[in-house]
Amino acid sequence: MRKLIFILIAVLFTHQSFSQIFDPVKWEFEKVEISNNEYELKFTATIENGWHLYSQNIDEGGPIPTTFTFTPNEKIKFNNKVIEPSPLKEYDPNFDMELGWFENKVTFKQKIEILSSTALEGEVEFMVCDEEKCLPPKYISYSFDLPYSKATEPDTQEKPLKEKTPESSPPNNAIDQTEANIPKSDKLALETNSFSTTTTSDDEVVLKDSSKNIINTDSKFSYKSKTIDINNPLSTCDVSEEKVATKSNLSIFILGFLGGLLALLTPCVFPMIPLTVSFFTKGDKNNKGVSNAILYGFFILMVYVVLSIPFHVLDSIDPNILNTISTNIYLNLAFFVVFIVFAISFFGYFEITLPSSIANKADQASSAGGIIGIFFMALTLALVSFSCTGPILGSLLAGSLSSDGGAMQLTSGMTGFGLALALPFGLFAAFPSWLDSLPKSGGWLTSVKVILGFIELALAFKFLSNADLVSHWNLITYELFLAIWIIICVCAALYLMGVIKFPHDSPIRKFSIFRIILIGAFLSGAIYLCTGFKYNEDTQTFTPLSLLSGLAPPAGYSWIHPNHCPLNLNCFHDYEEGLAYAKKVNKPIMLDFTGWACVNCRKMEENVWNKPEVFKIINQDYVLISLYVDDREKLANSDQHMFISENGQKKKIRTIGDKWATFQTETFVNNSQPYYALLSKDEKLLLSPVGYTPEVTSFRTYLECGLKANKINN
């Protein structure tokens, strides 16, 4: 479960393509002597406006809680656990649990009793979020000097070993004591806290965990390069990066609008258009019916926009909640099951409906007349059409929340959906003669609903694929995913031909132009998916399909042609090894800060790097070093250590991801991915780094500028 939590945090690496370093929480540590040799330790977090800090008490499976770790010390008795004030609480349906969090300022308290003068060290691990992003877990170390009152000094003759230990010397390593000599209260401290202190021959304090693995305070690796000057690259190159948010909102709006148009063509909605318009315009002498119909359409739009508001509340509590869907194995499996149910419903085996009492009450309220009555008429339409619109809205919800824009993208999608549903009522009321051009209701509406079922089925396997990628089951590989979608496309075409039948289908008397177009579209889709099995000689793997970027697994996630570097390029996953190779072959370096769960990183690799003009430059002219900042694989024991930055902040380097994330933060003052830096073999920055740059020409120009700068440097 701990691994899952870190995988969830990796989603933050898809939020922004280029950003600054954030440090929204300041900690203060204070001790208060409440009686002889009894202290209350206070840990106060001052949180910048807009950010929040999680409670200590979060069940497993939720986000990372605030956690206090104390160095075991036989001279200290812990009288209770760390106490926190009552947090703000909100139920989170994504985690199916209630989450507690703090804002502005919060103080945690711990009571202890000391047996002699000593010092207590430890660290606090915490995670913070604002309305747009969450930051990776951070560790802050603290230390308290705890003097003992001489007036109540215990009889030292009964404890000769402690009498011989000077008070100024570091505490003995509690882990090395035999269990028989450790008081019961201290045994509890040892069980609940994993780190202790020890000393080296030159009195340098290092960390030691409960498995007796030394974590050194020094490291041979330099996290802040002395030669890379982020503010003074050797050359300049004007490359514009993609501003993702606005484009994504527009894309989701368009998808929502298309979803609304599809909903119009279902049996639940289409027959309502002429009936409702006729109701407003029949016997209308003052042209008031047109304005009422337009108002009716406006209320339809507002109903769907209002549905997205609760997600903004969740987003303000923790924006990462709305974005973890893309990597959360349990949520993806849940969506897989839900979408299978949606598909079966659209195939006609049962209907998903809201309780009839809700629709009846809305219908009764619609008779009130005036603006209020029109509003409840719109609400009634939304409720009674749920069996057709619900699965489409579910698809829109899942697609919005699993992308980078969170609640804002959901609102954009809902606005598009509501607008598409509302337009016909206003337009046909203004131009009632257009009603004559509408096709008559019939069996074709059922066919549209079944086709939507096939689409829901395809999306279901998209979410199952997400779960498989995160868990590394290697089940829904690139080949199997394409095969499943090909089968779905062929089955949809066979259904439209009348070969496959479902309940409530009407006999096909003739093939309409629209039906023929749909048959051609699904067969063309199957053929297009088949081209995804084309072998690429340059990358030595399958050729990824650009239209499926972000839907299908990476081409390298394969049974037949697996690879561990993007596009099967020659790459290094260790900076020092890559640097040594660059010096050997006399080539510049393309430093790629990436993440296993970074969506925009995959988009760059599959839609930009794979283009021949870009691939050739990376493959032939650069040494590619891909550093995964979310890699949770443990470093060797001898490589784990405490890093102390220039401003005195401490961070434990335990994993490969810790190492490369700290390197990026310290040297490049940036903590977002993807992030590309071009370096000479002597570690000089050739150009200012760039982030997400999906325009092929711009990224190729950037690489070419780097080569020119490297040539001048040589």
Image (spheres, grey):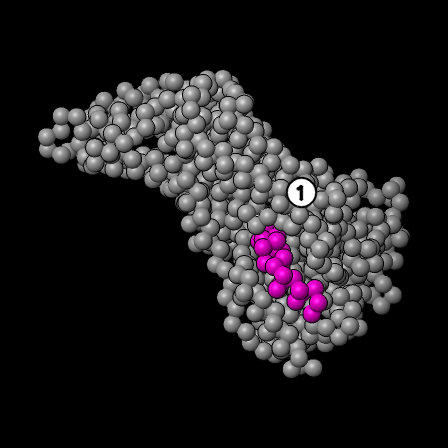
| Residue 216 located within the stretch drawn in magenta | no
Q: Give the range drawn in magenta.
A: 597-621
330 or 236, which is in the foreground? 236
Say how many tags the image has: 1
Query: Eyeballing the image, is 3 above or below 706?
Result: above
Residue linked to disc 1:
478
Q: Which residue lies furthest to the front in this view?
A: 510
* Residue 498, x across and y down, in percent: 50, 23
Query: Eyeballing the image, is 539 above or below 403?
Result: below
Q: How crowded is mark 1: few (under 14 residues within 10 Å), some or many (20 or more)?
A: many
Q: Residue at x 46, y 22 (%)?
A: 352
* Residue 55, x across and y down, in percent: 58, 43
Q: Which residue is drawn at 67% across and 72% down?
A: 679
* Residue 423, x across and y down, in percent: 30, 38
| Residue 610 located within the stretch drawn in magenta | yes
**The residue under label 1 is which amino acid type?**
Tyr
* The image quarter in which residue 98 lies: top right
342 or 217, which is in the foreground? 342
* The image quarter in which residue 613 lies: bottom right
Looking at the rendered image, the quarter that the C terminus falls into is bottom right
* Residue 160, x across and y down, in percent: 89, 52
Query: Eyeballing the image, is 482 above or below 575?
Result: above
The answer to whether residue 542 is visible is yes
The answer to whether residue 8 is visible is no
Looking at the rendered image, the quarter that the N terminus falls into is top right
Q: Residue at x 87, y 42 (%)?
A: 179
Query: Eyeballing the image, is 51 above or below 714?
Result: above
364 or 569, which is in the foreground? 569
Secondary structure beneath dot 1 equals: helix
Q: Which residue is drawn at 19% across and 35% down?
A: 290
Q: Main secondary structure of the magenta part?
A: helix
